Amino acid sequence: MRATVLGETRPSRTRLDPDIAASLRDTARKIRGKSALVWAEHCTECAMPSCYANCALYTPRRDLKCRRLTHGLELLRAEGAGPAQVMRASFRRWGKLEAQGQIATHSTMAVKLLEGMDRFASGLLEYPVLPFRLRRSASFAWNRVKAKLLKRLAAGRKPDALLLEVIGESATDILITVRNNVPDAGTFFQDKFGIAPGYNRILIPASNIARYVAVDRDILLSIEPASELDRPTLLFGALDFVVFDQPVTAARPAAERPESKPGIAKVKCVVWDLDNTLWNGTLVEDGPEALTLNQSAARTIVALDERGILNSIASKNSLNEVEPVLRKFGLWDYFLVPQIHWDRKSASIAAIAENLNIGRDSLILIDDQRFERAEVQSAHPEVETFDVTALETLLAGARFDMPATEESRKRRLMYKQEEARQQAGRQGQTDFLGFLRSCGIALTVSDLSAANITRVFELTERTNQLNYVARKMSRLELEAIERGEGRSRGLVLSVADRYGDYGIVGFALLDMASWTVESFFMSCRVQRKKVDHAFFDLLRRHAARAGLGRYSIAYRPSKRNEPSRVVLEDEMHLTWRPVDEDLKAFDVDTAVAIAESDIVTIDDRSSLGSLVSEPADAG
């Protein structure tokens, strides 16, 4: 349901693809109750009414409120969609949809009654019998009355899920946020969803939201584009907390998910210039005392660190002069492998990528000098560069869209611990395997759960080199696996050693029917530490207990995951067989231990052992 806005009462007619109309009609018939949220256009940067006077983007609609959607929230009458209502939103910059109320559901009959009253009242307000100012006040009052009527009609029935039907013209991402509608609400639910061209049905179990939001109190729900640069036009069907009387599942077109498209790497490290970028002034010419910190840059560095995105430096200066300045500003400890010298910046970029063991396409450079940006892009065209003026909107980009988790906040510390490991290895060990044994590497294997699913989702978004089938996994897919839907099990890998805790570093999806590792992701932080060897040997022992002679590991080659093949073929000495045009299966003989798997100790806390007590068919 829409908020009443003068001049936007009558719906427009539209024709949808017959399959999309059928999907909308089918879903509407399976809903027994819904919360009937009232949706309106809003602004992510709103500070009304003062912003109406000083915001360059203020565009008044008829009631003089700001227009944040190009044509408002348009109601459409879609042929063939049956009882389903459709709304169209063409997002402008800072535009979002927002609804507030309760998640308790009402009967569909009560909702239809209220919708009829809303159409009648909104139609009356369009007649120019009364002065415009009075009609405008009446429209605001009617919206408040609707909210009160919804509370009175509430049946008290808890919803099954938050249902969103979204029809996209092109691939895009949306951000959904649910929080309590009170100041300083504390925790909130938030997730990003990929929208493919065509009909998308998103289902978020109400229990997932209840972990973060007090569902017995008023909530505030918002939908907005995930990227500040992407201003999509989307059609919405159901946008409500609902109760179903028939099973309904999530759905999307067969087209490729936007987050699985190749060549769009998440940013793993931001490389900073210093003079007139991180600070105002030039160190050599102005001297350290004259420099002032660029506060926008400092805030960005801290925000990146919260998301687990690393920071480094490429600056033409002297290290012994730079370090005291950065310590004075309180930023020195934020930077890893800083390259502070008088060589080319392209050489610095290459050194940072090599030292951090990440792809150059996951680096970006921020530099105020056009020449320096061009020199880096000439040598490394895969490295995106930005002028310092881009800082205010930089973090809104899709490449920076990573959740802030406990794991992400510790990422910088983990890299520093790895630097200590490497230094110990260089100084005291000539035998690499002997050095690994001295580290006391311990692997813990556990089931995918609500406690670790956010970090696992982050891991699948970030991992490229050790991503065995070169795919991403959505939050919805992971939640379905965590609920036990389908025949696959999710196994989570955590690692620690005597130098520190790596946290969650890996995830495997095991098809229990065919005993195939369908997907495997592992962080490059534990690359070449034999963690993967130990994990696959654990699976070998479980498969042997199940009476299998072999199990398989799927591998699909890509431009980025050649290290995965090296591990399987050159280090574990496994042989492969073709499955289809580009998918391979590496077979593991359950009678033969995987080479060097004993270097890592294992604590198996997963339910896998209890699931293989009976012999299984190898498939």
Image (spheres, helix red, strand yellow):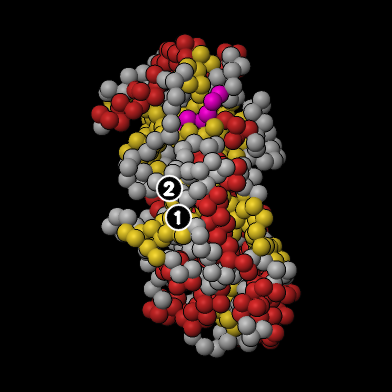
Residue at 51 percent of width and 30 percent of height: 162
For the stretch drawn in magenta, the main secondary structure is: strand
Q: In this view, does 407 lie to the left or right of 41?
A: right
| Image coordinates for residue 582, horizontal then vertical, percent | 31, 59
**Tag of residue 90:** none
Q: Regarding mark 2 in the picture, which secondary structure is present there? A: loop
Could you say which is closer to the camera, residue 37 or residue 205? 205
* Residue pointed to by mark 2: 618
Asked if residue 130 is positioned above or below residue 605 in the image, the reply reads above
Residue numbers of the magenta segment: 159-164
Q: How far apart are marks 2 and 1 (CA)?
A: 7 Å
Three-letter amino acid code of the residue under disc 1: Arg
Could you say which is closer to the camera, residue 440 or residue 316? 440
For the residues labelled 2 and 1, say whether their Cβ atoms are less than 8 Å apart.
Answer: yes
| Image coordinates for residue 277, horizontal then vertical, percent | 57, 72
| Image coordinates for residue 607, horizontal then vertical, percent | 61, 44
Could you say which is closer to the camera, residue 314 or residue 540? 540
Task: Locate residue 255: give its quadrant.
Answer: top left
Please say whether residue 253 is visible from this viewpoint.
Answer: yes
Three-letter amino acid code of the residue under disc 2: Ala
Q: Is residue 165 left or right of residue 322?
A: left
Q: Badge 2: few (under 14), some or many (20 or more) residues near its Cα, within 10 Å?
A: some
**Tag of residue 550:** 1
Q: Regarding mark 1 in the picture, which secondary structure is present there? A: strand
Residue at 63 percent of width and 86 percent of height: 430
Could you say which is closer to the camera, residue 164 or residue 115? 164
| Image coordinates for residue 173, horizontal then vertical, percent | 44, 46
Is residue 162 inside the magenta stretch?
yes
Residue at 48 percent of width and 21 percent of height: 244
Is residue 608 inside the magenta stretch?
no
Q: How many labels does the image show?
A: 2
Q: Which numbered disc, 2 or 1, marks the residue that appears first in the sequence?
A: 1
